[in-house]
Image (cartoon, rainbow, N blue to C red):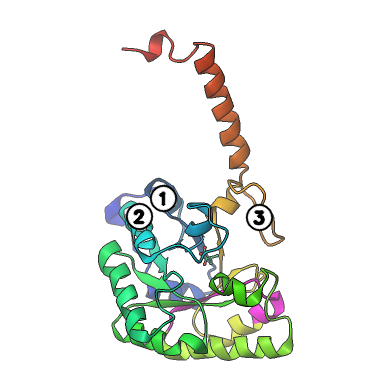
Amino acid sequence: MSASTSEIKRVTTHVIQAMKNRGEKIAMLTAYDYSMARILDDAGIDILLVGDSASNVMAGYETTLPITLDHMIYHAQSVVRAVKRCMVVVDLPFGSYQSNPEVALSSAIRVMKESGAHAIKLEGGSEVEESITRILKAGIPVMGHLGLTPQSIYKFGTYTVRAKEEAEALKLQEDAKLLQDLGCFALVLEKIPANLAGIVSKSLEIPTIGIGAGPDADGQVLVTHDMLGITKDFKPRFLRRYLELYDAINDATQRYVADVKRRDFPNESEKY
Ligand code: KIV
């Protein structure tokens, strides 16, 4: 998939919309650092999400709540420096947009200005309507996020499937329409019934990106560390593992340790 910089056509919000219009699925993964982002971009990923899942997989926190705006900007800067083709979307972290629209706008501006990312994502529907409107008015593309919204984990109390009951499913459909009408360019649907994701995706003009939302969303996203098997013990039904990197890295490290201990590394040809 490698191509010289001059041939590369950047993925923009228009490109993403055109993909939905012609029925091409959108592939999104998370990234938090330069080296990984470079590989994923070179492999043809359409969107890299600098997710607040960095709080879990990079920093080791149990939830996404502790990560700060400064941390997110640091991760976003590293990712932006790496990519040539894909679009970079950055999560606004918990506490950086919920209090009022001016705070939300200033957080979004910091992300765009300091990282060079192409869009922001935030969680919620009608509750964050004014913040989304304010950010969009400043010309910043916004990706919505409905269903399981991990920043509200202490309200939900569990990470199980959302919107199984009719009332919550209806609210989700209304929120999805609202986010589209406000001007969001895309929408993540996390851990909701496949049937509902299909209905929402069909009813919206903007693309939906599913995670644990079945095959009928317009695109798919996974946390890269889950998809590569770096997070060994996280095995939800929706996750497809493409590598067992935890085991591969563990094995390589054990062999390195053994080689050092038995004075096999470095050898004659590995010295100056
Ligand atoms: O933070 C994240 O990684 C996300 C994805 C799970 C969509 O929001």
Q: Which residues are magenta?
A: 184-198
Inter-mark Cα distance, 2 to 1 = 8 Å
Q: Residues within 10 Å of mark 3 (few under 14, many from 20)?
A: few
Of callouts 3 and 2, the N-terminal one: 2
Find the residue positioned furthest to the top. 268
Nearer to us of marks 2 and 1 is 2
Of callouts 2 and 1, the N-terminal one: 1
Q: Residues within 10 Å of mark 1 (few under 14, many from 20)?
A: some
| Left or right position of 77 against 99 | left
Q: What residue did someone put label 2 on?
A: 83
| Left or right position of 15 against 163 | left
Q: Position of residue 40 (x, y in %)?
A: 45, 51
Query: Which label was assigned to residue 70?
Result: none
Q: What residue did someone put label 1 on?
A: 42
Q: Is residue 62 above or below residue 230?
A: below
Q: Which of these two is toward me, 133 or 9? A: 133
Q: Is residue 117 above or below residue 34?
A: below
Q: Is residue 102 above or below residue 111?
A: below
> Is 188 included in the stretch rendered in magenta?
yes
Q: Is residue 123 above or below residue 248?
A: below
Q: Can residue 34 be seen from the camera position used here?
A: yes
Q: Residues within 10 Å of mark 2 (few under 14, many from 20)?
A: many
Question: As shown in the figure, which amino acid type bears the numbered disc 3?
Answer: Arg
Question: As shown in the figure, which amino acid type bears the numbered disc 1?
Answer: Asp
Q: What residue did someone put label 3 on?
A: 240
Inter-mark Cα distance, 3 to 1 = 21 Å
Question: Helix, strand or loop at disc 3?
Answer: loop
| Left or right position of 162 against 223 | right
Question: Does label 3 point to a residue whose CB lies under 8 Å from ligand 1?
Answer: no
Question: Helix, strand or loop at disc 1?
Answer: helix
> Is 78 included in the stretch rendered in magenta?
no
